[in-house]
Image: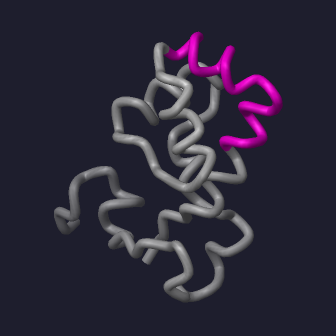
Amino acid sequence: MSTISVPAFTRKLREVVADEPKAFAYDLGLSLSAVYNYLNGRVPATEVLFRIARYTGRPMEWFLVDEEASLQPVTGSGELGVPTSYAASGRGGEGT
């Protein structure tokens, strides 16, 4: 199973936004309060995450996966389990 890591998302978004949340919000057409919500642990909707990824030149997965913790079991501390077939195959869980 792969996991979506909320702490990793927050950490990586802070890295990308740096000290410019107002400019980041403006460039993406987001409210400043939405950016602060994301910086404080809320994961955006897929459409917004896609815009963030396109803006930064990073894949969406980069924001959601904690590479350091991906080898460890899910601990329940801010991580959501995702079936590997959905995460890896891109075919919505269909068998091979």
Q: Residue 91: percent from the left, percent from the top?
A: 24, 52
Depth check: give the residue in front, 43 or 66.
43
41 vs 71, nearest the viewer = 41
Q: Residue at x 37, y 70 (%)?
A: 82
Percent position of residue 37, x then y: 52, 44
Q: The N terminus is located in which quarter?
A: bottom left
Q: In the drawing, does residue 30 fall left or right of residue 96? A: right
Q: Is residue 21 magenta?
A: yes
Dominant SS type (magenta): helix
* Image position, residue 83 (x, y; %): 33, 72
Q: Please say which color scheme the image uses.
A: one colour
Measuring 55% from the left and 61% from the top, which residue is drawn there? Answer: 6
| Residue 64 percent location from the top left of the image | 54, 54
Toward the right, the furthest residue is: 19
In the image, the segment drawn in magenta is 13-28
Looking at the picture, does residue 65 appear above or below residue 27?
below
x 78%, y 40%: residue: 15
- Name which residue lies at 53% across and 73% down: 78
Residue 3 in the image: above or below residue 52? below
